[in-house]
Image (cartoon, rainbow, N blue to C red):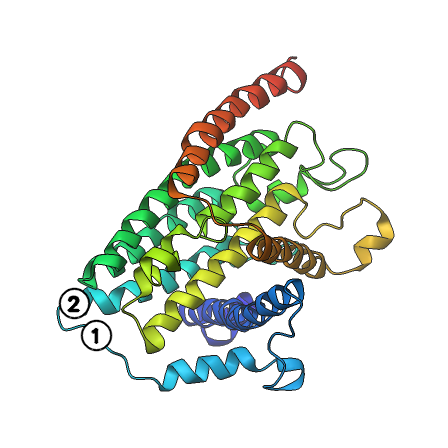
Amino acid sequence: MTEYLQTLIGYEAGWFVGTLALILLIALPLMLAVAMIIYADRKIWAAMALRKGPNVVGPFGLLQSFADGLKVFLQETIIPSGANKGLFLLAPIITFSVALLTWAVIPFGENMVLANINIGLLYILAVSSLGVYGVVIAGWASNSKYPFFSAMRAAAQMISYEVSIGFIIISVVLFAGSFNLQDIIIGQKSHLLGINAYGINPLLFPMAVMFLISSLAETARTPFDLTEAESELVAGYQTEYSSMAFALFWLGEYANVLLMCTLNAILFWGGWLPPIDWEPLYMVPGIIWLFAKIFFFFFIFSWVKATVPRYRYDQLMRLGWKIFLPVSLFWVFLVSGFLMLTRYSA
């Protein structure tokens, strides 16, 4: 499309219009997906608690998320008198923007990616780590005790689990031989026993499990939602926020949840490849397989939230620093040694 527009209206204008169109083609459906997974989240929780969940606004309650969005849009934005107004309003913008930027390198199918860069994984790690600034600024700028405590918790939690996530990703990169997400997916084709997944490999399956658990901690989902533990922090770093500022935090949080579900699917379970390397399955578009895997992991996220009790903060930190970090670091040596003996021994 970009090439066609460049021939039609000129190189620079065509590149700008084409790139903008592709960005909107990702961002707008992503916002719709966030609204629908909030609905799905609530329905899954309700089903596990033997309740109905949203069922009034729209058919089967499908429009409930949009009604909630309209409600917060019409609310007044209240800024605490002692808050730093500029930073207070900047924090949700940072959180929301960072959550969208990471999707630029996500491949939705073969050659269906906005920016197919060779360091896609490094880009995701670099950009997603900026999200901690939005949280810390929100807690500090609110000039309130509980949001500040929550921001400190969130910063420590996100940094702790980003370290182990980085070592887990190194194990995948060693197997794939590339940081490019397209190459990682293609490298999983018929990886073992005709299955398109690194997760089926006994050497990488423990890393897949650890990455899934770390994803829950990185996005502050139950049982690791200590940043907004209602019993002691009211609602966490978002306590003083209302109206669209609160909505931006909410949208950013669920966009990050979707991103981690997508990375679970891409890094370990074949991305847009069908589960089995069988020719008829390739007739289904790759984007359908990817969406099915994303929803499966999102179901696991909701399932855990509905059934697993919250950790204490010291348990959360112990799991990250005393278990996940040494195990993931040891696994890097294990995987690299295995590859040196088998793939590169000649």
| Residue 286 located left or right of residue 92 | right
SS of the residue under disc 1? loop
Tell me where residue 74 appears, x and y as whole percent.
Answer: 37, 87
Placement of 272 over or under 29, stated as above or below: above
Tell me where residue 187 appears, x and y as whole percent.
Answer: 66, 38
What count of labels does the image hold? 2
Q: Which residue is mark 1?
A: 79
Q: Which residue is mark 2?
A: 83
| Residue 285 located left or right of residue 16 | right
Q: Residue at x 65, y 49 (%)?
A: 271
Q: Give yes or no for contact between labels 2 and 1 (Cβ–Cβ under 8 Å).
A: yes
Is any atom of residue 185 visible in this view? yes
Spatial CA span between label 2 and label 1: 7 Å
Which image quarter: residue 142? bottom left
Q: Tell me the amino acid under the disc marked 2.
A: Ala
Q: Which mark is residue 63?
A: none
Q: Residue at x 46, y 34 (%)?
A: 319
Which image quarter: residue 190? top right
Q: Residue at x 49, y 71 (%)?
A: 24
Q: Residue at x 45, y 72 (%)?
A: 17
Tell me where residue 272 appears, x and y as whole percent.
Answer: 68, 53
On the rendered image, what quadrant is the N terminus found in?
bottom right
Q: Tell me the amino acid under the disc marked 1.
A: Ile
Is any atom of residue 107 visible in this view? no
Placement of 156 over or under 106, stated as above or below: above
Mark 2: few/some/many CA within 10 Å (<14, 14-19, 20+):
some
Tell me where residue 98 appears, x and y as whole percent.
Answer: 38, 58
